[in-house]
Amino acid sequence: MANATRGIEKEISALQLEEKKLVAEIKRTAKSGNEAATKILARQLIRLRQQIANLQGSRAHMRGIATHTQAIHAQTSVAAGMKGATKAMRAMNKQMAPAKQAKVIQDFQK
């Protein structure tokens, strides 16, 4: 899961670098007065930004899944710990025999 997230982040960084280059290219073509090329580059910029937004959404979704998986793992660990504690308490109750202990306590109180 972490590898996939890192891959998406790497792709986002590459696209953001490409976006900066594209913005510079748009400014250059606009300065030279080439309106047709500027429009084409602007459309490319829009698509590039949409792609970045989609990848950011995917990254957020992957992180959410990873967090959910960690929470489930923690719950499972707690459940296993509770199972062990219950087993230990059951063994102690068998050894201590609460009814027998109550009788011993009453004898001491006399």
Image (tube, rainbow, N blue to C red):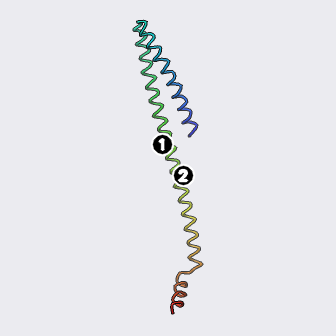
Q: Position of residue 66 (x, y in %)?
A: 52, 43
Can you tell which quarter of the image residue 40 is in? top left
Whole-percent x, y for residue 103 in the image: 53, 87
Residue for badge 1: 64
Query: What is the CA distance from the residue labelled 1 to the residue labelled 2?
Result: 14 Å
Residue annotated with mark 2: 73
Secondary structure of the residue carrying tag 1 is helix
Residue at x 56% of width, y 81% of height? 97
Residue type at tag 1: Gly
Tell me if 57 is positioned left or right of 6 in this view: left
Position of residue 83 relative to residue 65, above or below, is: below
Residue 80 percent across, percent down from the top left: 56, 60
**Left or right: 53 as drawn, with respect to 90:** left
User: Which image quadrant: the N terminus?
Assistant: top right
Query: Circle 2 — which element?
Result: helix
Q: Is residue 79 above or below residue 43?
A: below
